[in-house]
Image: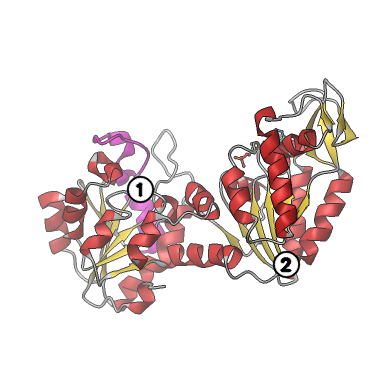
C-alpha cells in the first residue's frame, strides 16, 4: 500500500482530500472535532518534511451552490488550533483565486479550500473539475475514508491526474489495514457481531462475511426475523416477515460453510417501545403479543461472552439492543466490556459502520477496542465486499 511515508514532501505541495464534514452548532462552532484531529498526523508529516499542505473537503449537502452556512471558513480557527499552524483560507476550491493562493503558499504553510460541494461537478465526479483541482498540488493524498465509497471529483477522479504522485494518508491507510485484518488476514477464530435494527440493511454484509468468519453473533432487532423464521413466537418485536426465507437461507449457508451462528436465547422484553415500559426476561421464541424484545437477556450475554473471549479477531457492527434508552442499553454495554476484555487478552477488535460508533462513544469504549472506523457508509460497503472507488483510484 502506497502511503505518504513513500514520499518526501520537501518543497512539494500536497493536495489532501480530508473529511472535515464536522457538526456545527447554531453559532457555527464545531461541536465535535474528531475528524479534524484524525487528519492531523498526515498534515504534520508533510509539514515536517518541508512541504506545504492544501486541504480540501466537503461539508453538508449544499447541492452544487455556494451556501454561507456551509462555508469551511467556519472551521479555519479550529483547524489552526488542532494542527498548531495558522491556516489560510481561500473562498473557492478551484479557479484563479485558488491557484494564486497555492502559488503564494510557502513550505510549512497550510491552505484550506472552500467547500468542494459548492460546485455541482464534485458529487457528479466531473473530470473537468477534477483537472482544475489537480493543478493545486504536486502530490495527491487521499485521507478521507468517510467519502472513499463515492466516485466524486476530489475523492476518486482527481487521482488520474497524478499517475505517479498519489498515495493514502495515515488515516485512510489505517482504515484499509484494519478492515483487511478482519476480512482477509484475521487470526482465527474470527467473530463478527452484527446488531442493529433490520436484516434488510445488513443482508449483503451477512452474506459476504460468511466466507470470512468462524462465528457470527446476530443481535438487536434482526434477532426476531431469525427467531420467527425458526418457528418462534416474537410478539410485537421488530420483525421483517418478508425476510424470513432469507434468514433461513443464511442459516443454511452458514451450516454449509462451517460458520457457527449465535442468536439470542432470551431477551429483555417490554410492553411498550419506551424507557418507562414494564419489562421482563423472556425466552426469545416465547414472546407473547403485547410484548417486544428490546435488549439481550442474561443467558444470551453469558453465551456471547464465551464466544467473544475465545475469538482472536472481532468485528462489531450495530448495537444489540435499543441502547439509546437506558433500560435497554445493558446488553450493548456488556458486549463492549467483553470485547474490551478480549482485546486486553490480545484479540484485534474493530468497531464501525452505522450506529456502532455512536454506541461505542456513548459508553466510552473508543479507547478500549483496537480500532474504531470513522467511515459509516464506507465501512459498510467494505464489509459488503465492495471495492471502494476512492481506494481503487490510488491502488490502480
Ligand atoms: P443500525 O443503524 O442498523 O445499526 O441500527 C441501529 C438501531 O437499531 C439503533 O437505533 C437501535 O436502537 C436499534 N435496535 C437495536 N435493537 C433493537 C430491537 N430489539 N428493537 C428495535 N430496535 C433495535
At 45% across and 54% down in the image, what residue appears?
35
Give the residue displayed 83% in from the left and 49% down from the top. Answer: 301
Nearest the eye: 141 or 52: 141
Q: Nearer the viewer, residue 248 or 238?
A: 248
Residue closest to the eye, 394 or 8: 394
> Which residues are the magenta region?
59-84
Label 1, residues with CA under 10 Å away: few <14, some 14-19, many ≥20 = many
Snapshot quadrant of residue 86: bottom left
Q: Is residue 309 left or right of residue 140?
A: right
Height in image: 254 above or below 70? below
What's the residue at 60%, 64% (across, down)? 182
Q: Could you tell me if residue 232 is visible in this image? A: yes
Q: Quadrant of the C terminus?
A: bottom left
Indicate the position of residue 65 as horizontal and vertical percent values. 24, 34
**Cα–Cα gap, marks 2 and 1:** 44 Å
Residue 4's quadrant in the figure? bottom left
Which label belongs to residue 75?
Answer: 1
Which residue is drawn at the image coordinates 82% and 23% (left, top)? 271
Q: Secondary structure at mark 2?
A: loop
Question: Above or below — where is 56 with respect to 269?
Answer: below
- Residue 363 percent coordinates (x, y): 68, 49
List x then y, in percent, for residue 113: 25, 52
Q: Horizontally, is 296 left or right of 50 in the view?
A: right
Of the two numbered discs 2 and 1 on the same chain, state the one appearing first in sequence. 1
* Magenta-span inclusion, residue 65: yes
Q: How is the image coloured?
A: secondary structure
Name the quarter showing ligand 1: top right
Where 52 falls versus 288 (above or below)?
A: below
**What is the number of the mark on residue 189?**
2
Q: Nearer the viewer, residue 377 or 272?
A: 377
Amino acid at each position: 500500500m502506497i502511503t505518504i511515508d513513500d514520499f518526501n514532501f520537501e518543497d512539494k505541495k500536497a493536495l489532501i482530500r480530508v473529511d472535515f464534514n464536522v457538526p456545527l452548532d447554531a453559532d457555527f462552532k464545531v461541536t465535535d472535532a474528531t475528524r479534524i484531529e484524525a487528519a492531523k498526523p498526515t498534515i504534520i508529516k508533510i509539514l515536517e518534511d518541508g512541504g506545504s499542505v492544501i486541504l480540501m473537503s466537503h461539508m453538508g449537502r449544499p447541492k452544487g451552490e455556494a451556501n454561507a452556512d456551509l462555508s469551511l471558513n467556519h472551521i479555519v480557527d479550529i483547524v489552526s488550533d488542532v494542527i498548531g499552524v495558522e491556516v489560510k483560507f481561500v473562498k473557492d476550491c478551484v479557479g484563479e483565486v485558488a491557484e494564486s493562493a497555492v502559488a503564494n503558499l510557502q513550505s510549512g504553510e497550510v491552505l484550506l479550500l472552500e467547500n468542494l460541494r459548492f460546485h455541482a461537478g464534485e458529487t457528479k465526479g466531473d473530470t473537468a473539475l477534477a483537472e482544475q483541482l489537480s493543478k493545486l498540488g504536486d502530490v495527491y493524498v487521499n485521507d478521507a475514508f468517510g467519502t472513499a465509497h463515492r466516485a466524486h471529483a476530489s475523492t476518486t477522479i482527481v487521482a488520474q491526474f497524478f499517475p505517479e504522485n498519489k498515495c493514502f494518508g495515515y488515516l485512510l491507510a489505517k482504515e484499509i489495514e484494519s478492515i483487511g485484518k478482519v476480512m482477509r488476514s484475521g487470526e482465527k477464530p474470527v467473530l463478527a457481531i452484527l446488531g442493529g435494527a433490520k436484516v434488510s440493511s445488513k443482508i449483503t454484509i451477512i452474506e459476504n462475511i460468511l466466507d470470512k468468519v468462524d462465528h457470527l453473533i446476530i443481535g438487536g432487532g434482526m434477532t426476531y426475523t431469525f427467531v420467527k423464521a425458526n418457528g418462534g413466537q416474537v410478539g410485537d418485536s421488530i420483525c421483517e416477515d418478508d425476510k424470513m426465507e432469507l434468514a433461513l437461507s443464511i442459516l443454511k449457508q452458514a451450516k454449509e460453510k462451517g460458520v457457527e451462528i449465535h442468536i439470542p436465547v432470551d431477551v429483555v422484553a417490554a410492553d411498550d417501545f419506551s424507557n418507562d415500559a414494564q419489562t421482563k426476561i423472556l425466552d426469545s421464541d416465547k414472546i407473547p403479543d403485547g410484548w417486544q424484545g428490546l435488549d439481550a437477556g442474561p443467558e444470551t450475554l453469558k453465551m456471547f461472552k464465551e464466544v467473544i473471549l475465545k475469538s482472536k479477531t472481532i468485528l462489531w457492527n450495530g448495537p444489540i439492543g435499543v441502547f439509546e434508552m437506558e433500560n435497554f442499553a445493558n446488553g450493548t454495554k456488556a458486549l463492549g466490556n467483553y470485547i474490551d476484555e478480549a482485546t486486553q487478552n490480545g484479540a484485534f477488535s474493530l468497531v464501525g459502520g452505522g450506529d456502532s460508533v455512536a454506541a461505542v462513544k456513548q459508553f466510552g469504549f473508543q479507547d478500549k477496542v483496537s480500532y474504531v472506523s470513522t467511515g459509516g457508509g464506507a465501512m459498510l460497503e467494505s464489509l459488503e465486499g465492495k471495492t471502494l472507488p476512492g481506494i481503487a483510484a490510488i491502488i490502480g
